[in-house]
Image: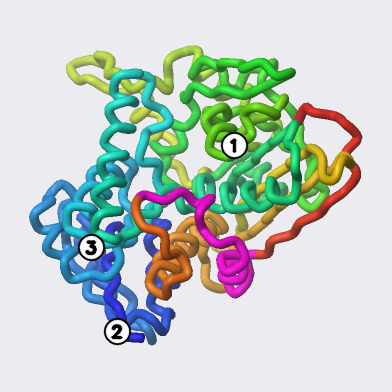
């Protein structure tokens, strides 16, 4: 197989893990690494990294980006979320395959017209990518990403699905969580975390759709506890995202009676952010503060980001939890399937579990496109990624998948 060139856009926390992984690939002879920060030029001079050609690139400079894309066999897009859809559009125009960990249709967009416009644009990108014989794989990180692959597998073990609960979360180990008042430390974009805390959600309970306003996601009536013995305690779980959209994606909307997608945190976290959301601290719209205008959510992100207590020390580990709980019937018998991954920071490399499950996953996706394991064309969802080859790639990176099937007692709720 001819050696390939990869273009990596973005060299943030997840980008560093993606680069570490992709340079090891025997399929790849060259990696063009592009980022807006001059720090991109300070790539490690260790074995494998001689493949890397680093360039400074403004992500809004589409002309220069297109020229780099023309040199690549696949693009790994690890830029801030607002660039995801425009970069996918550019890749389709150039005719180069792409993997992104981001949503192309913003789940936080509350304007229906804008959301529909994004969906129409995504369909146009799909048509162009399909006609040019390229693959654009979206939402291929941890959550979304690994969770969707695991869900598709779990549903394949049931003939009728009545309950489906999906958990995707990153948080500190229990002993680390007690070291600050939020019981939380950051492993990805702080502003991204803040924005995910003011996002409308929708879940299904007793066959009825429950709409959760953006500032209500942490309210007690929408919260439940999850026991995960391997983690040493109970987790608070909050709805995050539109479950009805995923019910349609997985084709279970006619049978599912209870369904939700959740983030998890250690107890107490939600009560704090519920008050913050209700008080307007997570709002985007700038307010006057003296002689300047300040966005409340950007202020919150800057305030927390300026404090050492909210970041991991070298000997502290974070946890990534991906858990799919599917319940229904197989051959007329009630069955419960639990697919799960628990990953922790690798103290040897220093990569957090969030870097591993996002950055490594993007790299795996790029390599699966290069070697033909992902061969469908157009815009793809993670549910179209072949399960066993992907799980084998995760295992090769010590990201361990477990699965269990047991008798289902008929209980629907999470």
Circle 1 residue: 251
Which dot, 3 or 1, sits closer to the camera?
1
Of 70 and 46, the residue lying toward us: 70
The image quarter in which residue 223 lies:
top right
Residue 50's disc number: 2
- Residue 264's place in the image compared with 136, above or below, is above
Percent from the top left, x then y, of residue 346?
Answer: 59, 67
Residue 326's disc number: none
Residue at horizontal 60%, vertical 43%? Answer: 168
Percent from the top left, x then y, of residue 326?
Answer: 74, 41
Q: Earlier in the sequence, mark 1 or mark 2?
A: 2
Circle 3 residue: 34
Query: Does the magenta-highlighted stretch encompass residue 393?
Result: yes
CA–CA distance in space, label 2 to label 3: 15 Å
CA–CA distance in space, label 3 to label 1: 39 Å
Percent from the top left, x then y, of residue 6?
Answer: 29, 71
Q: Using the rendered image of the protein, determine whether residue 11 is visible from the camera's viewpoint.
A: no
Residue at horizontal 76%, vertical 56%? Answer: 403
Percent from the top left, x then y, of residue 212?
Answer: 56, 17
The image quarter in which residue 86 lies:
top left
Magenta part, dominant SS: helix
The part of the chain drawn in magenta is: 379-399
Residue at horizontal 62%, vertical 29%? Answer: 253
Q: Earlier in the sequence, mark 2 or mark 3?
A: 3
Of 290 and 408, the residue lying toward us: 408
Which dot, 1 or 2, sits closer to the camera?
1
Q: Earlier in the sequence, mark 3 or mark 1?
A: 3
């Amino acid at each position: 197989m001819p050696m390939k060139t990869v273009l990596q856009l973005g060299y943030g926390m997840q980008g560093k893990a993606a680069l570490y992984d992709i340079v090891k690939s025997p399929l790849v002879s060259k990696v063009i690494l592009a980022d807006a920060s001059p720090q991109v030029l300070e790539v490690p001079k260790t074995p494998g990294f001689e493949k890397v050609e680093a360039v400074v690139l403004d992500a809004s400079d589409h002309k220069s980006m297109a020229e780099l894309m023309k040199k690549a066999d696949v693009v790994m897009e690890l830029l801030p979320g607002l660039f995801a859809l425009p970069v996918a559009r550019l890749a389709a125009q150039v005719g180069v395959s792409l993997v992104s960990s981001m949503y192309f249709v913003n789940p936080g967009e509350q304007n229906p017209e804008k959301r529909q416009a994004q969906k129409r644009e995504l369909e146009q990108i799909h048509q162009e990518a399909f006609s040019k014989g390229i693959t654009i794989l979206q939402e291929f990180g941890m959550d979304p990403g690994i969770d969707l692959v695991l869900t598709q597998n779990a549903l394949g073990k049931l003939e009728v699905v009545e309950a489906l609960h999906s958990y995707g979360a990153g948080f500190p180990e229990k002993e680390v969580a007690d070291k600050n008042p939020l019981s939380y430390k950051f492993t990805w974009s702080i502003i991204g975390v803040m924005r995910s805390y003011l996002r409308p959600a929708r879940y299904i309970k007793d066959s009825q759709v429950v709409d959760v306003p953006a500032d209500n996601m942490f309210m007690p009536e929408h919260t439940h506890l999850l026991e995960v013995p391997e983690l040493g305690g109970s987790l608070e779980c909050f709805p995050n995202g539109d479950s009805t959209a995923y019910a349609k994606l997985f084709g279970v909307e006619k049978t599912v009676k209870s369904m939700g997608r959740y983030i998890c945190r250690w107890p107490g976290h939600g009560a704090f952010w519920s008050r913050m959301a209700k008080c307007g601290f997570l709002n985007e719209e700038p307010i006057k503060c003296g002689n300047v205008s300040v966005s409340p959510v950007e202020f919150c992100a800057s305030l927390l980001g300026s404090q050492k207590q909210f970041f991991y020390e070298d000997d502290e580990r974070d946890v990534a939890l991906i858990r799919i709980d599917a319940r229904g019937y197989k051959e007329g018998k009630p069955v419960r399937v639990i697919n799960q991954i628990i990953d922790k920071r690798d103290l040897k490399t220093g990569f957090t579990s969030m870097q591993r499950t996002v950055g490594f996953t993007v790299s795996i996706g790029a390599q699966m496109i290069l070697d033909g394991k992902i061969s469908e064309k157009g815009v793809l969802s993670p549910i179209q990624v072949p399960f066993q080859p992907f799980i084998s790639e995760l295992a090769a990176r010590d990201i361990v998948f477990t699965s269990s099937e047991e008798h289902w007692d008929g209980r629907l709720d999470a």
